[in-house]
Amino acid sequence: MPAKIIIILNPFAKSRRAEKQIDRLCRMTGNTSISLTSHPGDATQKAAQAAKKGVSVVVAAGGDGTVNEVLNGLAGTSAALGILPIGTMNVVARQLGLPLKLRDAWQVIQTGATRAIDIGLARFQFNGVPQKRHFAQMAGIGLDAQIVREVTWKEKQRWGPSSYLLTALKVIPRPAPPIRIGIKNGPSWNCAFALAGNGNYYGGPFPVFAKARLDDQLLDLCTFDSGGWRGLERFLRLTLLGPDRLPKGLQYRQTPAFTATATGDVPVQLDGEFVGCLPAAFRVIPNGLRVVTPSTS
């Protein structure tokens, strides 16, 4: 068991269900320190402070948004990220092969192994101000980011994962400005929306980025030449058939870095959280984060 562990808990993850789990979490983890977040960005600050104090494992207790905040405080440090998945989708936990039951996930944190994985780094705009942020699993530009941007916390409370589908029905019919994708020392092209994966999964247990690995020093980039219902149909075909049988109008490339620009308002999401808008640049950070995984992985 690591010498020092701290748990950073998002008490709003999955709302009432998570609130009911707080007492259970306290009983299950004994004397382990639990720090509750109070505002966006708080988990990043708490994680960075814990790493500076020599904490061995900083545990993100929440959903993918909480995991993303914690990893942004740990990237480049010697502290490892542990995950107690109590969010809506838990994509990063699935990617790492972690159990989704709370007690089993805690057992992994106590007895599991640590490994280094690649992470992504995105530079983008928020209200006209340049920003940068790491991501563990995936990034979205355009259509899916707009869905993430518009889905409300109350909708996620009430409908869970279905809230994204309901919001998609409103967003998909809208026209969107074209996006220009560029690869360093490579081609550039226009698309309607784009997805980039560091790991295989997108939106849950869907292996959209079938060729991706967490240690290959590459991002898997999928671009769609059409938005709307046609773009959705091609996305679903990618999910079902994989990148070896690409539908027309879809490109799948592996690259360590790429850029995206647009003339209009085009949003960006990282690990399922809206962060800002284009222009943006994305690149992989090899072995940028240590994580706790099952000892058999």
Image: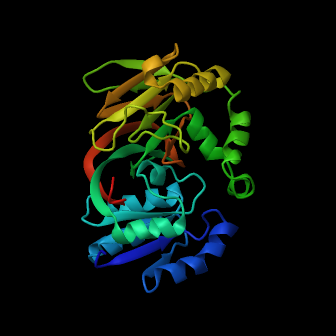
Q: Position of residue 152 (x, y in %)?
A: 69, 52
Work out which quarter of the rendered image holds the N terminus and state it: bottom left
Q: Position of residue 276 (x, y in %)?
A: 50, 45
For the point 42% across and 18% down, which residue is it? 189
For the point 69% across and 40% down, which residue is it? 165
Locate residue 74 relative to residue 238 in the image: left or right. Answer: left
Locate residue 168 relative to residue 38 in the image: left or right. Answer: right
Model colouring? rainbow
Q: Which one is nearer the viewer's eye here, 200 or 105?
A: 105
Q: Quadrant of residue 114?
A: bottom left
Q: Is residue 105 visible?
A: yes
Q: What residue occupies the far bottom of the structure in this picture?
A: 31
Q: Position of residue 46 (x, y in %)?
A: 41, 72
Count of labels in the image: 0
For the point 43% across and 86% down, which residue is it? 31
Q: What residue occupies the far front of the structure in this picture?
A: 296
Locate residue 54 relative to residue 282 in the image: left or right. Answer: left
Q: Is residue 45 visible?
A: no
With respect to residue 217, does 236 lie above or below? above
For the point 64% across and 62% down, which residue is it? 14
Q: Position of residue 222 (x, y in %)?
A: 45, 27
Q: Quadrant of residue 77?
A: bottom left
Q: Which one is nearer the viewer's eye here, 246 or 152?
A: 246
Q: What residue occupies the far top of the structure in this picture?
A: 248
